[in-house]
Image (spheres, grey):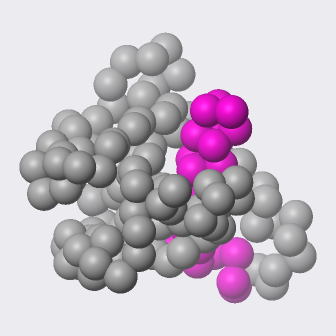
């Protein structure tokens, strides 16, 4: 059983999270500038056994598409073309940034550290991935 890579795709930065080999626990991995994302994923797939990708699906409260939806769909299309043997799943990412900010606040970090947007992206990716793991079981 390979690991699952969680992706909170953004036009500037992308948060990444990964599971353990048993696919039980999601852990924050890093945040990558989106223009470096394809290379980062290639290197990760080469060194780790990645069995699937989980990408956050940006939707409005009413379920309609957002401005980011087309960017995410284009990214998913590239993933499927480059890694045809690795499955790609999408999961609703509504409220993940808000939950991530609340989790960071509750962790007791200093204000300056809490304002790091890259940290919010990484925690959001972790929440997306853990939601997928919970939903799947």
- State the residue in front, 13 or 27: 27
- Residue at 49% over, 14% down: 62
Across and down, in percent, residue 14 comes to: 39, 65
Q: Is residue 13 above or below residue 39?
A: above
Q: Can residue 40 be seen in the rendering of this structure?
A: no
Q: Is residue 25 above or below residue 130?
A: below
Quarter where residue 24 is shown? bottom right
Magenta segment, which residues? 112-137
Quarter where residue 29 is shown? bottom right
- Residue 54 is left or right of residue 111, and the answer is left
- Residue at 89% over, 76% down: 108
- Residue at 54% over, 65% down: 18
Q: Is 133 inside the magenta-drawn segment? A: yes
Across and down, in percent, residue 28 comes to: 60, 70
- State the residue in front, 13 or 82: 82
- State the residue in front, 56 or 24: 24
- Residue at 68% over, 33% down: 137
- Residue 118 is left or right of residue 73, and the answer is right
Farthest residue in the top direction? 62
Magenta stretch, main secondary structure, is: helix
Across and down, in percent, residue 31 comes to: 45, 75
Across and down, in percent, residue 20 comes to: 63, 66
Quarter where residue 26 is shown? bottom right
- State the residue in front, 58 or 81: 81
Q: Is 60 inside the magenta-drawn segment? A: no
């Amino acid at each position: 059983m390979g690991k699952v890579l969680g992706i909170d795709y953004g036009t500037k930065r992308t948060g990444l999270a990964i599971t353990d080999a048993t696919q039980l626990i999601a852990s924050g991995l890093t945040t990558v500038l989106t223009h470096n994302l394809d290379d980062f994923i290639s290197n990760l797939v080469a060194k780790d056994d990645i069995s699937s990708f989980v990408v956050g699906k940006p939707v409005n409260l009413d379920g309609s598409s957002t401005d980011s939806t087309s960017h995410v769909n284009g990214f998913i299309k590239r993933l499927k073309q480059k890694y045809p043997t690795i499955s790609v799943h999408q999961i609703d990412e509504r409220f993940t940034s808000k939950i991530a900010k609340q989790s960071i606040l509750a962790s007791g970090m200093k204000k300056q550290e809490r304002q790091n947007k890259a940290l919010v992206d990484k925690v959001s990716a972790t929440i997306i991935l853990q939601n997928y793991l919970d939903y799947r079981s």
